[in-house]
Amino acid sequence: MRIVLLGGTGHIGTYLVPRLVAAGHEVFVIARGEQEPYQLHAAWQSVHRLKIDRTAAEKTGEFGRQIASLEGDVVIDLICFTLSSATQLVEALRGKVQHFLHCGTIWVHGPSVVVPTSEEQPRRPFGEYGIQKAAIEAYLLREARLYGFPATILHPGHIVGPGWNPLNPAGHFNPNVFSRLARGDELILPNLGLETVHHVHADDVAHAFYQAMINRSASLGESFHVVSPSAITLRGYAEQVSGWFGKKAQLRFLPWDQWKETVSKEEASSTWDHIAHSPNCSIGKAQRLIDYRPRYTSLEAVAEAVERLGAGG
C-alpha cells in the first residue's frame, strides 16, 4: 500500500518507518524541516520525503489538498494538535483513503478515577493540550460512526526511547535527576511520591500503529491506549533507578507548595501536569482487538534511554 506519514521523523516515526518499509509498503514522510530520525536505518533510503510546513499550509487551506493529492491508501497523522487541523484533513480525505490513524494522548482522560483507566471511561481533560486532543478524538469517532470515515485513534503515554530525555522520577525532564540517583545523592519528591506516571517505548507505539493498520476491521472507529503494561509511582521509579547504579535511593518528601520552590518554574509546571493526571491506563482493549504486545515495561524503556544518556556523558 501507499502510506502517507505526517511527522514521520520524530519519536514514533523513527521506529514506524522501518516497519512499514520492511512490510513492502511505499512510504511518503511529510515533515516541516530536514530533521533526521533519532536512529538511522537503511529503510529511509527508499522513503519519499516531502517538506511541507503544516501550519502555513493550513492557514491557506492547502494542507488537506496537498495530502490528498498523494493518493495514500493509509494516512497516519502523528502531529495533529487542534480540532481545526483535524477537520481540514478529514474533509480533504473523505472518500479518498482506506484508513486514517491519528496519534492522540492519554491526556484525554484528565485525572484518574477508576484505575487502570479504560478507553470507555468519560473524558474529563484539562489543559489546552488534553482538551484539544479529546475534541479531536470525539470528532474522529463521530465521523467514523455516523459517516463511515475510516478513523482509528491511538493514545500513547509518556513516550521514551534512546535519543531524548525521558520523563524522570520527579515528574519533569531534567536529566540531572538521574545523575543524582546514580551518585546516591538525596532526591526530593513532591507529596509522598505516590502519584503515577505511565511510560511507553517509542518502538511499542510504532508496533501499535502497525497492528491497528493490519487489523483494520477491528480498529476502525475505535481508540486504544498505547502504554507499557503497568504504570509506576514516582517513589518506586526513583528506587528502581537508584538500584541500577548499585545505590539505595535517598528520598525526602515535601508538600507540593514547598516542593515547587526547590525546582525551576518550568520543572514545577511539568511535574504538576504529570502528578495532577497521575495516569494509569489499561491496554486490555488493544491487546484484545489489535494484538498489541508491548516489548518494554516502563522501567525497561527508561533504562534504554538512560543508558544512552550515560554513554553521551
Image (cartoon, helix red, strand yellow):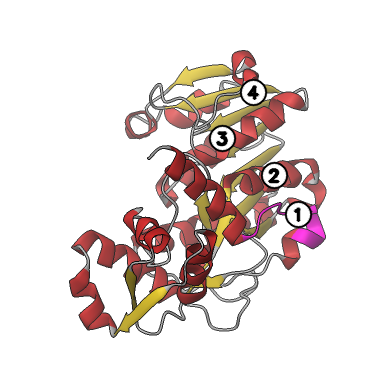
Which mark is first along the chain, 3 or 2? 3
Residue 207 - label: 2
Q: Which residue is mark 1?
A: 293
Q: Which residue is labeled 3 in the image?
A: 13
Between the C-alphas of marks 3 and 1, the distance is 18 Å
Check the picture and name the quadrant holding the C terminus. top left
Compare residues 1 and 255 and report the one nearer the observer. 255
Name the mark on residue 27: 4
- Given contact means CB atoms under 8 Å apart, are the residues at marks 2 and 1 in contact? yes
Instruction: Give the secondary structure at mark 3.
Output: helix
State left or right for residue 152 relative to residue 134: right
Of circles 1 and 4, which is in front? 1
**Disc 2 secondary structure class:** helix
**Could you give the CA–CA distance between mark 2 and mark 3, rounded to whole angstroms?**
11 Å
Task: Report whether 173 appears left or right of 99.
Answer: left
Q: CA distance from mark 1 to mark 4?
A: 24 Å
Q: CA distance from mark 2 to mark 1?
A: 8 Å
Marks 2 and 4 close (CB-CB < 8 Å): no
Residue 103 drawn at (x, y percent): 55, 48
Give the magenta range. 287-297
Q: Is residue 93 visible?
A: no
Measured along the vertical axis of the image, is residue 42 above or below residue 88? Answer: above
- Label 4 secondary element: strand
Near-viewer residue (182 or 152): 182
- Residue 6 percent location from the top left of the image: 52, 33
